[in-house]
Amino acid sequence: MANDIIRAKRYFERGVYYYELSAWGECVANMNDALELLPTHFEARMYLGAALCKQARYLDAIRILEEGRKQPLDEPSRLRLLRLLAVISAVRQDYPAAQYYLRQALRLSPEDPALVNLAASTYCCAGDFDYGLELFRKAIVLSDGH
């Protein structure tokens, strides 16, 4: 088991290296190897989701990240995960899914102006301009822009 953790760390470090080089295929391969050895490696899962997005493999990214939601996570990690899922869903123009993830994220952090702003954008993209504008106003107030 200790050997697997060390190997997973090495795969993860290589994956980060390839991510920084924009070598998405190599990053994905290394992050997959890290997660195979250590399925609870949160950062590997987040990098893998982001690298899959860079390859326009959005459904694969969502699947990987959804698997991470089943694991026990602290609140900041859960919030990061939900935010990434929301952004991926919005990029896919799946606004109901993006709104679903954002509602969950806003339950964790209702006073986060960046998160409220993201929700506002998503609602506007979905055609709900009244609610989107309401959220934009709330984001301004939350960011001390009275």
Image (cartoon, helix red, strand yellow):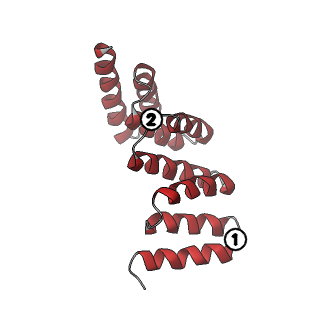
> Are dots 1 and 2 in contact, CB under 8 Å?
no
Give the x, y percent position of residue 115: 48, 63
Q: Look at label 1 and name its amino acid.
A: Asp
Task: Tell me where residue 109 appears, x and y as whole percent.
Answer: 45, 60
Tell me which amino acid carries mark 2.
Answer: Arg
Relative to 22, say whether 37 is above or below.
above
Quarter in which the C terminus is drawn: bottom left
Q: CA distance from mark 1 to mark 2?
A: 32 Å
The residue closer to the viewer here, 121 or 69, is: 69
Residue occupied by mark 2:
45
**What residue is drawn where x is 55% and y is 54%?**
104
Q: Position of residue 5 (x, y in %)?
A: 31, 20
Residue at 34 percent across and 16 percent down: it is 4
Q: Which residue is mark 1?
A: 128
User: Mark 1 vs mark 2: which is more N-terminal?
Assistant: 2
State the mark number for residue 22.
none
Where residue 35 appears, x then y in whole percent? Answer: 43, 25
How many labels sit on residues?
2
Q: Is residue 89 left or right of residue 2?
A: right
- Residue 134, by quadrant, is bottom right
- Could you say whether the residue bearing mark 2 is in a helix, strand or loop? helix
Q: In the displayed image of the protein, which residue is found farthest to the bottom?
A: 146
Residue 26, quarter of picture: top left
Q: With 137 as the anchor, is 131 left or right in this view?
A: right
**Judging from the image, what secondary structure is the residue with disc 1 in?**
loop
Residue 132, picture quadrant:
bottom right
User: How dense is the environment of label 1, judged by Cα within 10 Å: few (below 14), some, or many (20 and up)?
Assistant: few
Label 2 Cα crowd, 10 Å radius (few <14 / some 14-19 / many 20+): many
User: Would you place residue 22 above or below residue 103 in this image?
Assistant: above
The residue lying at 43 percent from left, 22 percent from top is: 33
Task: Depth check: give the residue in front, 66 or 50.
Answer: 66
